[in-house]
Amino acid sequence: MSRILIVEDNEDLAFGLRTALEFEGYTVDVAGEGDEGLELAQSWRPDLVVLDLMLPGIDGYAVVRQLRRGGLHIPVLILTARGEESDVVMGFDCGADDYVTKPFSTVELLARVRALLRRAASAGAAPARHAKERFGNIDVDPTTRIVRRDGDLVELTPKEFDLLLALVRRRGAVATRADLLREVWQYENVNVLTRTVDIHVAELRRKLEDDPSNPRHILTVRKVGYRLQT
């Protein structure tokens, strides 16, 4: 069974998370500080990290950054008590994969955990599609996962790239939020309320569109989802 590391300084919450995850059959370890969590992640190599952002020592952002810089691509689910989207965006930019906002239900957390573990397990199993893609002044190389805008390299997070590729390969067809949650984030229950897709789309527009507030390529289909216009 998968191994999960919880990095959370609230002892009651950490205990509750550990109990719920162990009940599902996962092997769980807990760290109460950022430095301890980083060290455990590097030495124990869990299959998933559940990470609070506000921690003693180094914060959750620094933990994710150092994991990614060290070449560890362990899925990271961040916990944030704040309602500010900027915290979530910063977490994604550091390399986190998904988030839940406190307070959250155990059912929701477990759904996110299963989705991230499934995504990690199937990452190498999907059939390869290597054809390079282009729209407007954007070049997308699925093999190298490199994106260029007017020839200049654009830094995308792994999930931003996966989302972009999902839109590109639909050739202008609409992708619902539910479609994208299933395909990119491997969600089982797409009825769980989350703005994950919208936040990532906003970041893609910021990085790829000439005018993010009036996008030319990554378009919103009202009350449905998104589509890519070439």
Image (tube, rainbow, N blue to C red):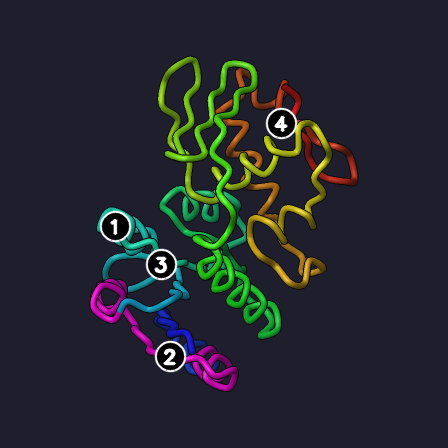
Q: Which residue is mark 3?
A: 74
Mark 2 and mark 4 residues within 8 Å of each other at the beta carbon: no
Q: Amino acid at mark 1?
A: Gly
Identify the residue shown where x is 48% and y is 48%: 88
Report how far apart the C-alphas of labels 3 and 1 lie in the structure: 9 Å
Report how far apart the C-alphas of labels 4 and 1 lie in the structure: 30 Å
* 3 or 4: tag closer to the N-terminus: 3
* 2 or 1: tag closer to the N-terminus: 2
Report how far apart the C-alphas of labels 3 and 4 lie in the structure: 29 Å
Q: Which residue is mark 1?
A: 71
- Judge left or right: residue 35 versus residue 139: left
Near mark 4 (Cα within 10 A), the count class, few <14, some 14-19 or many ≥20, is many
**Numbered label attached to residue 28:** 2
Q: Amino acid at mark 3?
A: Ile
Where residue 200 sits: x, y (%)?
A: 54, 40
Q: Amino acid at mark 4?
A: Ile
The range drawn in magenta is: 17-44
Q: Quadrant of residue 45?
A: bottom left
Where residue 121 sits: x, y (%)?
A: 45, 61
Report how far apart the C-alphas of labels 2 and 4 lie in the structure: 40 Å
Near mark 1 (Cα within 10 A), the count class, few <14, some 14-19 or many ≥20, is few
Mark 3 and mark 4 residues within 8 Å of each other at the beta carbon: no
Q: Which residue is mark 4?
A: 218
Question: Which image quarter holds the N terminus?
Answer: bottom left
